[in-house]
Amino acid sequence: MATATAQPAMVERLPRSRSIFPWSSERLTPILLVAPSVILIGIFVYGFIGQTIRVSLSRWNNVLPDYTFVGLRNYIRLFGIERFQNDLINTVHFTAFFLAGCLVIGLGAAVLLDQRLRGTLFFQNVFMYPLALAFVVTGTVWRWIFNPYTGINVILDNLHLGFLKSGWLTDTNVALNGVVIAAVWQMSGFCMAMFLAGLRGIPEELREAARVDGATEWQLFWRVVFPLLRPITLSAVIILGHISLKIFDLIYVMTSGGPGYSSDLPSLYMFRATFQENLYGRGAAIATMLLLLVAILIVPYLIWNIRGETER
Amino acid sequence: MSVLVAPARSRGRLSPARLGLYALLVVLGVFYLTPIFAIIITSLKSAAELARTTVWDMPMSPSLESYATAFQALAPSFFNSIYLVVPATLVSAFLGSMNGYVLAKWKFRGANLIFTLLLFGMFIPYQSVLIPLVQLLTSINLYGGIPGLILVHIVYGIPICTLIFRNYYAGVPKELLEAGRIDGASVLGIYRHILLPLSVPGFVVVLIWQFTSIWNEFLFAVTISGNNQPITVALVNLAGSIAPQPNVQMAGALLAAVPTLLVYILLGRYFVRGLLAGSLKG
C-alpha cells in the first residue's frame, strides 16, 4: 500500500525535492559565482589582517622576518613613544576640525543650493569637482597656495587681515590646520551631496504645513527639516570620520608629518616605521590600532545598515 | 534668518534676501575655484616670471614650457596609470556585477553575512594589510610592477562594486527573473540574457567610480609599484626629484587631474551616484 500511494506523491513533489537536493545547479551556481570574490577577500582582507596582528605580536623589528611571539611588547612600547602619543592627539585634532568644517560647509552649501536659485547646478558642480581629484593633486596645489611668501598670505595682506598670516605648513602650530583646510576643500562636497539628497527628499507639503502653522523659516529649519536630516548627518559623520582616521596622501604630500612631528598621523607613522625603518612589529602594531579605531566606527554602522535593510 | 526666506514662489525676483544668498554662493564658489585658478595661472608662467610674481598674478606672457617639462617627466607614468586602471576597473566591475546579482537575487543561507564581511573590506585602513600584501606579492613575483597593482585594485575594489550592483539589481523586478526561470533559463542564463542587458547604468556608475578611485590612489601605488610608478606617485616625486619649480608641479598636477576631471565634467551625475553609494544607504 505504501508503494501504491507513493508514486503520484513523488511526481508531485519532484520539482520541490530537486531544489532541496544540495548540489542542484540552482543552489550551486550562485555559490560558485561569488566564490572567487569571497576567497580573494577572505585572503586579502581577513587573512592579511590576521597576519598583520601576528606580526604585531612578534619580535620582527628588523630586515629579516622573526615571528617569535613577544606578546603585547610592541604595543606597550608604542604607547610609550612620544611620537605616537602626539599622533593620537593629532588624529583627534584633525578629525574634529575636519568633521566640523565638512559638516558646516556641507550643510550650508546644501541649504543654499536647495533655495531654487538660478545657477544652482553650476554651483553644485563647482562645490563637488574636488572630489574627482586625487589627494596628491589637492596636496600639491595647497602646498603651493600655503607657501608663506607669495601665496595665501598675500591675499590676507590685501584684505587687511594681516594678523591671520602665518608660516602655514612651516609653522608647528599651524601645519596640521593647513592640511585640514585642504581636506575640507576636497571632501566638503561629499557632505553637501548627502545633505542635498536629504533635503530634496523632504516633501514640500511638510514645510508648507509648518508655514501654515506660523513657523518662521528659522524654526522650520531647526524644528522640522534638520531633525529629518539626522540619519544622514550620522552617516556623514561616520564616513568622513573613518576617512579622516585613514588620511595619508595629503599629509604625505603637504607636510610629510612635519615640521618635526607636528602634523604626523598614525597612517604615516605606520608607513615610515615599516618600510623605511624596517620596524615591522611596530608598524603592524600601529596598523592594528588604526584598524581598531576604524572598526569601532564602522562595524556598528554596517550592522545597523544591514539590519535596517532586512527590516524594511 | 535670511538664508531660508526664499521659498519657490519668489523665483525670478531679486530681493535683497536673494542677493544675500547669491553673495554666499559666490563666496563659497571662490573658495572652491581658487586652487584650480592657482594651478592654471602658475602653470602658464615661465620660470623667470615665476620668480618675480605672487601666486595670484596673471601670467604676462603665457608659455606652455612647464607643460612640456611636466609631460616629459610624467608621460611614462601617465601610461602606466592607464595600463593599470583599464583592466583593474573592468575586472572588478565584472566581479561586482556577478556578486551583486547573486546577493540581490539568489540569497542563499548566510548571504547577508557574506555581504557584510565583503563590505567591511572597503572601510579598512589599507595599512592593516600592507605588510602581508608586500610579502605575498614578493613571493609570487608581482611586487614592483603594474600587474601586482592591478591584482590589488581588483581585490580591494570588489566590495564597493558588489555594493553598487547589489543595490542596483535589488531594484530589478522579481517577475522578470521568474519569467526567465519559467522559460527554463539557468542561473547564468538569467544573468546573461535578462540582467546584463539591463545593467548598463549600473556599469556606468561602477566603471566611473573605479576609474576615478584607482587613478587617484596613492598608498598602494607608493608601496608596491617600485620603478613602474602610476601618475600619483610620479607627481609626488616630481616635486622631489627635479628642481621643484612650482610651474612644472602645477602643470603636472593638472596633467594628473585631467582624466578624472573630464569624467566628472562629462558624467558627473553617475559619479555622484557612486559617491553616495559608498555611504551604504542607497
Image: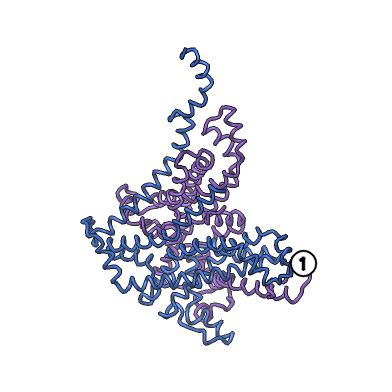
Chain colours: A blue, B purple
| Front-lying residue, A92 or A127 | A92
Q: Is residue A79 left or right of residue A100?
A: left
Q: How many marks?
A: 1
The residue identified by callout 1 is B11
Percent coordinates x, y for residue A77 in the rendering: 26, 68
Q: Secondary structure at mark 1?
A: loop
Q: Chain of mark 1?
A: B
- Residue at 50% in and 54% down: A304
Q: Amino acid at mark 1?
A: Arg
Give the answer, above or below, for where B180 lies relative to A130.
above
Percent coordinates x, y for residue B54 in the rendering: 53, 80
Percent coordinates x, y for residue A227 in the rendering: 61, 64
- Residue at 68% in and 68% down: A220
Percent coordinates x, y for residue B180 in the rendering: 59, 31
Give the answer, above or below, for where B246 lies relative to A275.
below
Task: Determine the image quadrant of residue B233.
Answer: bottom left
Crowd around label 1: few <14 · some 14–19 · many ≥20 (10 Å): some
- Residue at 65% in and 71% down: B25
Q: Is residue B29 left or right of residue A282?
A: right
| Front-lying residue, B224 or A238 | A238
Instruction: For the N terminus of chain B, give its image quadrant.
Output: bottom right
| Front-lying residue, A276 or B196 | B196
Q: Is residue A1 left or right of residue B56?
A: left
Which residue in the rendered view is the most extreme toward the front? A1
| Front-lying residue, B148 or A6 | A6
- Residue at 78% in and 68% down: B10
